[in-house]
Amino acid sequence: MGAVWIRTIPQEGAGTSVLPIFRIDASARRPS
């Protein structure tokens, strides 16, 4: 549940930091 964690993070100073994290999470959540 990485997406949920990213959504919980405040978009104050983690704007560009969340982008790469979300990309990795989306790839991992993708069903093989």
Image (tube, rainbow, N blue to C red):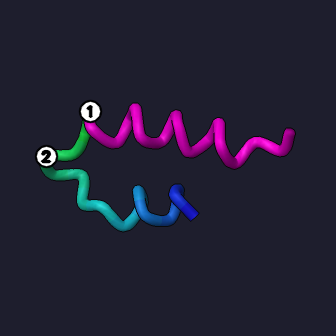
Crowding around mark 1 (Cα neighbors within 10 Å: few <14, some 14 to 19, many 20+) is few
**Nearer-the-camera pick, 7 or 5:** 5
Q: Quadrant of the N terminus?
A: bottom right
- What residue sits right under mark 1 in the picture? 16
Residue 24: image location, x then y, percent: 53, 37
- What residue sits right under mark 2 in the picture? 13
CA gap, disc 1 to disc 2?
A: 8 Å
Placement of 7 over or under 12, stated as above or below: below
Residue 26: image location, x then y, percent: 62, 41
Crowding around mark 2 (Cα neighbors within 10 Å: few <14, some 14 to 19, many 20+) is few
Q: Quadrant of the C terminus?
A: top right
Left/right of residue 30 with respect to residue 19 in the rendered view = right
Q: Which residues are magenta?
A: 17-32
- Callout 2: helix, strand or loop? loop
Q: Is residue 16 shown in magenta?
A: no
**Nearer-the-camera pick, 32 or 15:** 32
